[in-house]
Image (cartoon, helix red, strand yellow):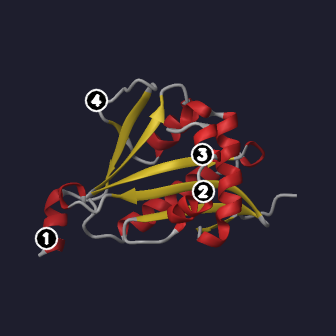
Amino acid sequence: MRPTAPLFRPLSIDDVDAFRALRLRGMLEKPETFRTSYAEEAALPLIRLQQRLIHTPHQRMFGAWDGDTLVGMAGLKREPIAVVHERANIWGVYVAPQARGAGLARGLIGAALDYARTLPELRRVTLMVNVDNAAARALYRKLGFTLVAGTLDAQRDEQMQLLLRPAEAVEAAAK
């Protein structure tokens, strides 16, 4: 039985087993939407997965919970390098089949964007989406993401971006 409202919260290292299980499930179901293979991910030491769940000024992973079950995830990561510090990437978006259609992907992306908006130096958020994933592409467009021209890669992924604030606002916040 699905609760009326899913719980959205940042994941922590205590959630590593649920995170690993859901991520591997996603790789089995939709391998084309991940940048690594099931075999590579399954072979990673637990410490490497825990590192993805540590909250830092440069990364945060969000989860959607149905009771005690993690049913969705989305991460936000940015580079600490000053040249690209104004950009963050959304990655690892996945919602389990039994939880789809309830707005979880929208809620997860919303949580990541809400967090991104608290970082005054961020100007834009980018993500990669497979051209065959019509539902994801439509959701991202509804949330204000636009296609970055000429970004189709060998995996048939395209880059999309959302401008959070104009460059002038980022520069003013830095002063």
Q: Report the Cα–Cα distance between label 4 and label 2.
A: 37 Å
For label 1, the residue is 172
Say what amino acid the circle numbered 4 marks. Answer: Ala
Q: Which residue is mark 2?
A: 45
Type of amino acid under label 2: Pro
Residue 28, percent across and down? 69, 36
141 lies above or below 114: above
Q: Are marks 2 and 1 in contact (CB under 8 Å)?
A: no
x, y (%) of residue 136?
Answer: 54, 38
Q: Quote the CA–CA distance across marks 3 and 1.
A: 41 Å
Circle 3: is it few (<14), some (14-19), or many (20+) Cα within 10 Å?
A: some
Q: Amino acid at mark 3?
A: Glu
Label 2, label 1: how many angstroms apart (C-alpha)?
A: 42 Å
Depth check, mark 3 against mark 4: the one in front is: 3
CA gap, disc 1 to disc 4?
28 Å
Work out which residue is located at the far right of the displayed protein and give it: 1
Q: Is residue 102 left or right of residue 154?
A: right
Query: Nearer the N terminus, badge 3 or badge 1?
Result: 3
Label 1: few (<14), some or many (≥20) within 10 Å?
Answer: few
Q: Where is the C terminus found, in terms of image quarters?
A: bottom left
Q: What is the quadrant of residue 108 in the picture?
A: bottom right
Instruction: Tell me the SS state at disc 4.
Output: loop
Q: Earlier in the sequence, mark 4 or mark 2?
A: 2
Earlier in the chain: of badge 3 and badge 4, it is 3
**Residue 127 sits in which quadrant?**
top left
Q: CA distance from mark 3 to mark 4?
A: 30 Å
Image side of residue 68 versus residue 131, left or right: right
